[in-house]
Image (cartoon, coloured by chain):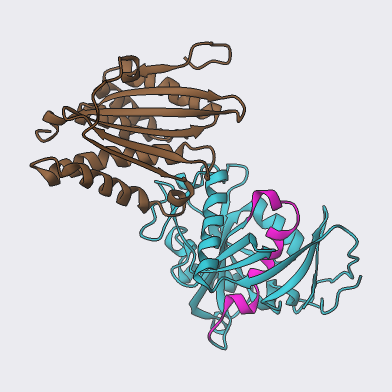
Chain colours: A brown, B cyan
Amino acid sequence: MLTKKSPKLPVYGIYLGTPTRKKPLSRVDYTFIPIDYIAHWSRCGITADYLAEYQAFNFEKRDRVKNILSTIINELLENAVKFSADAYKEISISIYNYADTISIQTINSTYRRQAEHFDGYVQKLLDEDPEELFIENIMKNAENEKSASQLGLITLVKDFNAKIGAKIIPDLERRLYDIYFKVVIDTNAIEEL
Amino acid sequence: MKFSNLKTGTQKEVISLDFSASTVTIEVKEAIKRSEIIESQYLIAEVYNKYYKIFFSKDYSDLEAKIEPYPHRYIYAKVGDEIVGCAGLYTHNTYVEKYGDVSTEDIINTLLSLNLDPNHYNLEEKREITKIVSKPEWVGKGIGAFIWGAAYSKFFLGNQTEKPPIITCCAKLSTFQYFEKFTGITTHKIKSFPEYKIHEYYRSQRDPMESRLVIPNLDIPNRWYNLKIPSVYNVGKDTNSLKFQSLG
């Protein structure tokens, strides 16, 4: 839990396991500044499509895989942009293919309040049944709560069986928090989804 | 220092202004070159996202997803080589028509309520001033208010016909009050603006949004309507007034 006094860094989900020693077969690292996406929101879609299509060459059902990966990447990109504290502070997205899995990680900086909100949300996402969480969030959105819907992240877990993880690293000097968020998809299962 | 040419066509009181407060020298222009348009768009996007968590797209707009359309034209204030403030103009398909449920009939009714003859206005040609922003580090120097006034210049409104165009705007009440106080430009309520998620951090129950009408010969002082653009101005603002002087 992210609290002012807690000495322990919040690390959740797949970040808690031992990192793989495998070398990625495919690797793309893409860095950008959020203002480009704030100014032209459609760039989220074209970036996600490009990165997804790049990965989809490894699959038989290219269009199907491209669509799934594009949905996942788009969700992560949009969240990283929406919850960035500074429109000119870099965001990065990395997509690694380890043969048996595809890992997609975003890193962005956010304010304490957003970091705390995200911290609580990730814990819920890992602890609760995604179907129930999905319905709960739909109800909240219907009540027009001011928070972002975050249905997208639940959908990734619910519909694509994605494994997720998060790390929140404080940058005390800048009073910001670096949010690491990772989604891992099973390569063998993705064409059958 | 005295100002010249401050008489208004709207018969509003004009005060002779002393220009002793600290001022900023700005170059005011319409964004014509692609570089000027890009810089204006990025400034609007940066400020609207910072304060209201709003995003922009040229391809589509979705007020529930907090994605706004861009205006069609821009006017900006530059200090050195940096755009420090700008405003946009919808030259058709205005925001109040698209999202505010404002019809031509609503506009005619507003004109009639002001005892104005709708036939004296070009109801087919609508303009809407929008997205007035200042760079956060330049807020408080009068640039936003000056740009609001400059946006109501005949030059920027660009009416194509003899009859004046219909000019609309959409903002929260406090914004209208602020700009009226500093520019003297008055506005007339057409109707309340519907509630959308995109305005969740902008409007409030105590400070709702309205669609309003601006009548050039009634509401826009001559110093704004006939403002020389492009030009360089000294601009200063204190708690009660905006002062400016053309440097030619």
Residue B16 vertical position relative to residue A42 in the rendered view, above or below: below
Residue B230 vertical position relative to residue B189 in the rendered view, above or below: below
Q: Residue B124: x percent and y percent?
A: 46, 79
Q: Residue at x 50, y 67 (%)?
A: B106
Q: Residue at x 37, y 17 (%)?
A: A12
* Magenta span includes B243: no
* Magenta span includes B146: yes
**Quarter of image, res B114:** bottom right
Can residue B195 be seen in this snapshot?
no
| Quarter occupied by the C terminus of chain A | top left
B25 with respect to B169 (left or right): right
Could you tell me how many numbered marks the image carries?
0
The residue lying toward the viewer, choosing from B177 and B61, is B61
Q: Residue at x 44, y 21 (%)?
A: A119
**Quarter of image, res B57:** bottom left
The residue lying toward the viewer, choosing from A140 and B74, is B74
Residue A137 vertical position relative to residue B82 in the rendered view, above or below: above
Q: Residue B72: x percent and y percent?
A: 48, 69
The residue lying toward the viewer, choosing from B203 and A72, is A72
The residue lying toward the viewer, choosing from B31 and A29, is A29
B124 with respect to B129 (left or right): left
Q: Residue at x 58, y 42 (%)?
A: B205
Boundaries of the magenta span:
B134-160
